[in-house]
Image (cartoon, rainbow, N blue to C red):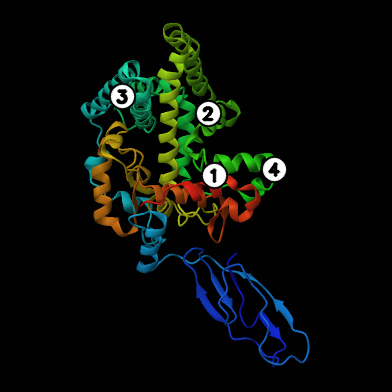
Amino acid sequence: MACRLADSSLIFKGCQQRPVQSIKIASLSSPGIYYLNRRSLHQGEYKHHQCLYPKKRPKIIKAVAIPVPPLVVDSTEQRKQLCESYGFTQIGEPLPGNFTIKDIIDTLPKKVFEIDDVKAWKSVLTSVASYTLGIFMIAKAPWYLLPLAWAWTGTAVTGFFVIGHDCAHKSFSKNKLMEDIVGTLAFLPLIYPYEPWRFKHDRHHAKTNMLNEDTAWHPIMREEFDSSPVFRKAIIFGYGPIRAWMSIAHWLVWHFDLKKFRPNEVKRAKISLACVFAFITIGWPVIIYKTGLMGWIKFWLMPWLGYHFWMSTFTMVHHTAPHIPFKSPEEWNAAQSQLNGTVHCNYPRWIETLCHDINVHIPHHISPRIPSYNLRAAHQSLQENWGKYLNEATWNWRLMKTIMTMCHVYNKQKNYVSFDEIAPEESQPITFLKRMMPDYA
């Protein structure tokens, strides 16, 4: 914990009976300020050293730890070091608190908000064609090429999610009934209920990186981590080795419980749930009847798991990094969270094409009304006008390793504390990842 141990509050008695001179130390890895004695100590390790002067009586240590806010990463050199350490290409400067979302939106070209029906339906055609090709590859590929066919098909079906995502944000078509129909149909192969997802996702945009309020990825609270040994072990695996599929748990928890919705949302949620269950009760038996149980695994389950890999990966990369804080409602600032707290990450071009540029995510958080086919133009504008505040990366193993081995338990001073720092004896999955995951940036 960041604290101030100053001469007035930390007094070493003995050894000539006078306070020890304090030294100010700033740390890159754990933001905070520390005042220590002349011997260099690691953060959090306040060790008592033998005095070199003759002792007249035993030393008495009195200390008062005064919490201080974490240091803001505000120097160019610090940001360069963190970029290298975390696998980023740029860590943005802190956005001054006097800017608002409207200030940022006003700098965007008006054309990026325009809905183009031709481009919208072109994205549908792209997803349908790529998914059809994927199913064909699964049907024809020998067993040793099936992982490649599943990777392609899972990525292609992620494009369906992005189309439904645009529909939910009312950025697909000028015909709002058409949007709801297309969104519902696009989500069906993923057995995602469209309206429940839309209601919860709107909350994510309204409260991005707000502590306890954001409905997307969220740090684990220390109280939760300590609440149950069973939960602790499950969450260490969930936020460690299987984090790239944790969106499955999110899908189950958030979208099928009608108690989680407001009374005026329940009717629409029920319609979406009925559509999903109809797909399950009709679509799954048809697949099994035509191809057998192994066919259901090959043609539906494996691409679905591929989709959840991208769903989890995109989401955690968009909003998770050691330097990106979650803030309490009292401290939260919309412009800082949407511009400074969202990450733009470049992926291989075929992935970006099949997923309709969902990775170009900062402009989407500045305004969800920007259609996916206009996100690149909007991002270029943000780079021109707000470039020094942007967090950017190109997908790499070091970036993933940072997220999966460091970004675990919420800590106000350090943003995150890793599981193996809190419970090393139970965190073998995390130490395994640290040892085995590549560190290439």
- Seen in the picture, residue 286 relative to 254 is either above or below; the reply is above
Q: Which percent across, then down, holds residue 293?
A: 48, 13
Q: Are the residues tagged 2 and 1 within 8 Å (C-beta)?
A: no
Q: Residue furthest top?
A: 289
- For disc 2, the neighbor class at 10 Å (few under 14, some 14 to 19, many from 20) is many
**With 197 as the anchor, is 35 left or right in this view?**
right
Q: Are the residues tagged 3 and 4 within 8 Å (C-beta)?
A: no
* Residue for point 34% across, 52% down: 392
For residue 255, which numbered disc appears in the image? 2
Query: Who comes first in sequence, dot 3 or dot 4?
Result: 3
The amino acid type, in three-letter code, at marker 4 is Pro
Query: Who comes first in sequence, dot 2 or dot 1?
Result: 1
Query: Who comes first in sequence, dot 2 or dot 4?
Result: 4
For residue 175, which numbered disc appears in the image? 3
In the image shown, does 145 or 326 lie closer to the viewer?
145
Q: Are the residues tagged 2 and 3 within 8 Å (C-beta)?
A: no
